[in-house]
Image (cartoon, rainbow, N blue to C red):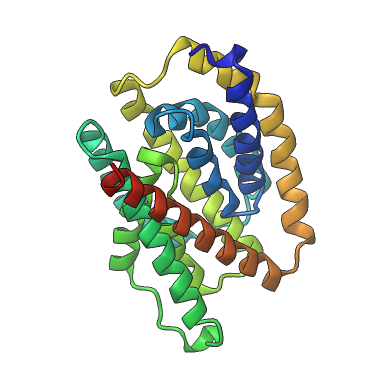
Amino acid sequence: MTFFTDPLFYAFAVPAVVFLGLSKGGFTGIGMVATPLLAIILPPLEAAAILLPIILLQDVMSCWIYRRDWDPWNLKVMLPGAVIGVGAAWFFAAHVSNAAIRLVVGLIALGFALNAWLTRNIKPEDLPKPRAGLGVIWGGVAAFTSTLVQIGGPPYFVFVLPQRLPKMLFVGTTCWFFALVNLMKVAPYVGLGQFTNSGLVTSAVLFPVAIASNFLGVWLVRVTPEALFFRITNVLVLVLGLELTRQGLMDLFGH
């Protein structure tokens, strides 16, 4: 397929990039829709490789915007695990079934949504303090799934969302964590031969959509009330978890 001349491709790619831009602008969670959407017409790793240059461009803008809003402790405990997670994804990419990855990530997302519902009435001061060891584990899982299918949000949220960080601090920390993880992915994608000339040209063609949607996301996150922001994120993760679980089960047992 010559991506940049195929109208069907753009019917899926443009909405995917818009979702990414909204997410990178701070509307965290909605970006998880991007790769599954594009994976409807492409293999997940190929879809992820086309989106990665776009994500890196959006990361530069987002990290500049949120350069003062990030939590050092969360990055310190999660990034060591992320290094291991990216390395593990690189090693297993040629052997792990896409269907199995979809199913695992979907179940993690459903687990997160259930946890968010069960703890919805708990005050932040009554929540257990986050432990560094769990941060390393969830950082690794987030980086692993992000490398394979660009969906690192659910594992990341399992560790960070229960902390109930102030909205802007939560958004900035999320932007910085995934920006650094995305940089780590470049070597595996090169090693796996996922970057192609047509794919890179397609990424460049989609840059204007990425930039515009990024700024739209920044505006939306600033005008959206904090309680509504987290409620929307929880619903998105639930819907995505259901869809990924369905896809994984169908691919594994539907044939």
- 195 with respect to 122 (left or right): left
Q: Residue at x 78, y 50 (%)?
A: 219
Pick the residue in front: 124 or 200: 200
Does 2 appear above or below 74?
above
Q: Residue at x 65, y 61 (%)?
A: 168
Looking at the rendered image, the quarter that the C terminus falls into is top left
- 84 with respect to 147 (left or right): left
Viewer can see residue 247: yes
Q: In the image, residue 210 lies at what x, y percent?
A: 66, 32
Pick the residue in front: 176 or 233: 233
Q: Hey, which quadrant is residue 45 in on the image?
A: top left
Q: Residue at x 38, y 36 (%)?
A: 184
How many discs mark residues in the rendered view? 0
Q: Residue at x 53, y 39 (%)?
A: 37
Q: In the image, residue 169 lies at what x, y percent?
A: 60, 62
Does 217 appear above or below 226?
above
Viewer can see residue 159: no
Q: In the image, residue 150 lies at what x, y percent?
A: 44, 41
Q: Hey, which quadrant is residue 108 in on the image?
A: bottom left
- List the single residue furthest toward the front: 255
Q: In the image, residue 222 lies at what x, y percent?
A: 76, 58
